[in-house]
Amino acid sequence: MALLEHATAEQLRRLLEFFPAPKLKYEWPGLKGQKKEDACQLIAGTGDHARIGTFLMANFAHCRQHVLLLSRQKKESDPLAALPHSDLLGEPHGGVSFHLATVQYSVYLLDPVEEVQISVLWPIKIEQQDEITLLRTFVLERDPSNYSGRTLLKAVRHFDEKKLASDLAQLGLPGLDINKGVKALWDSKAVDAPRVRYKESGSTNTVDMDDGMGLRDTKPEAYEEIVKKPLLNTNFRPQSDPEDPEKAQKIFQANPTFGRLGFTSYSEDPGDTDAVIKSILQNNQ
Amino acid sequence: MLLSNRFFKIISDRLVATPARLKAFSALDTQHIYVENVRALLGTNTWIARQICETAVRQGLFVKRIQVLCPDGAVAVTVTDEKVVPDEVQCWREIDGELEPFAERTERLDRLEFYQLVRTAA
């Protein structure tokens, strides 16, 4: 907990900005009517680190996140070894733990030109399930919030997310092939794909559907062929629901061949993200 | 019995010969067989499909190859062994509608394995 306990108000403010405004205002009802950035500043100003930590763990599933599904080839493999230095936040139940890491940025500001170091607190959730490890991290912004009022010229992040997969593989945690589970979800008609990237003999192909239509419903013959091949970065969209028109806007990305999912929209229902992962894993066996 | 025939017998024993599966079976490019092709063809899981491919390698029927993928999924280079993967490859990215080459370190890139049927076994 040391990273959270010793966090500055700016660090707490950046941490709170990962969360959707309605969830912040539900937890701190006195902030209704405030802009999100102001609400984050006010909550950070309370310095109530314990409450912020509890809020973080309870609302993790609502946030924009990357999920790595890893095959645990060695029982003792610890995914945290591939991540920046982190502290344990809590272990609410068996096999699930929350951590907080720090990601450093070098930020270049104008008027006058100055290099500033910024440290962003980065929440991580790890779930151990038999021979599978789920590693969830919040989607990091390209540029961290800049509260100086000065123009930000450039930000350089000192953590290479692109290298994370190969570092984890070297630790005995390669990406889990979830083609079977993702294709079962696709076949169930719960989702369809407006953009599909797949590998076939001699080429890597992409299908971008017009007007965001789904490939399975619009081109069933192409769908039947594509589901026999390894899928790469593919966008999936939940089927439209008349009672929840916004649901179909919540596109998620999957790279099934390498066991990666990306939920880049906020989730109203904490079950949205979990339900997708659960369905994929159940059907992947 | 030729090794290839033995291998295909293993597969065909697992295969319920529906017309769609037989069509997929005959359409396999024997020089580019991905684990997922085998899994989808047999309707099995990835673990079993991989074991079948690895068994074929041990029996001298298949050889394994490794593709190094650019961030967009395009194959930058295909090698016979991880030890001979170059440190850097050229990839392409689209910036403002124009394609520009860039050098990428291979330690940051995904690997995708595939198998080739050894021609003398065919």
Image (cartoon, rainbow, N blue to C red):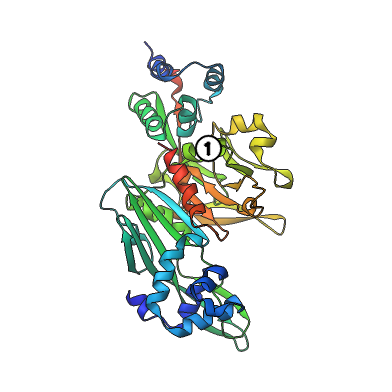
Give residue A243's position: percent from left, percent from top. Answer: 65, 50
Which one is nearer the viewer's eye here, A145 or A203?
Answer: A145
Q: Secondary structure at mark 1?
A: helix
Give residue B82's position: percent from left, percent from top. Answer: 40, 44
A126 sits to left or right of B79: left
Residue A121, visible in the rendered structure: yes
Give residue A239's position: percent from left, percent from top. Answer: 62, 44
Q: Quadrant of the C terminus of chain A?
A: top left
Residue A146, visible in the rendered structure: no
Report crowding for label 1: few under 14, some 14 to 19, many 20 or more residues within 10 A (C-alpha): many
Which one is nearer the viewer's eye here, B78 or A283?
Answer: A283
**Residue at mark 1:** A183
Chain on which label 1 sits: A
Query: Does residue A194 sit above or below B122 in this rendering?
Result: below
Give residue A82's position: percent from left, percent from top. Answer: 36, 60
Outermost residue, top side: B1
B122 sits to left or right of A247: left
Q: Residue placed at 49% from the left, 57% from the top?
A: A270
How many numbered circles does the render carry?
A: 1
Which one is nearer the viewer's eye here, A50 or B42?
Answer: A50
Q: Amino acid at mark 1?
A: Lys
Query: Does residue A100 sit above or below A267 in this rendering?
Result: below
Query: Does residue B53 sit above or below B5 in this rendering?
Result: below
Q: Residue placed at 52% from the left, 56% from the top?
A: B104
Q: Residue placed at 59% from the left, 57% from the top?
A: B102
The picture quadrant where one finds residue A198 is top right
Which one is nearer the viewer's eye here, B9 or B121?
Answer: B9
Query: Does residue A245 sit above or below A214 in this rendering?
Result: below
The picture quadrant where one finds residue A109 is bottom right
Outermost residue, left side: A76
Q: Residue placed at 45% from the left, 19% from the top?
A: B15
Q: Quadrant of the N terminus of chain A?
A: bottom left
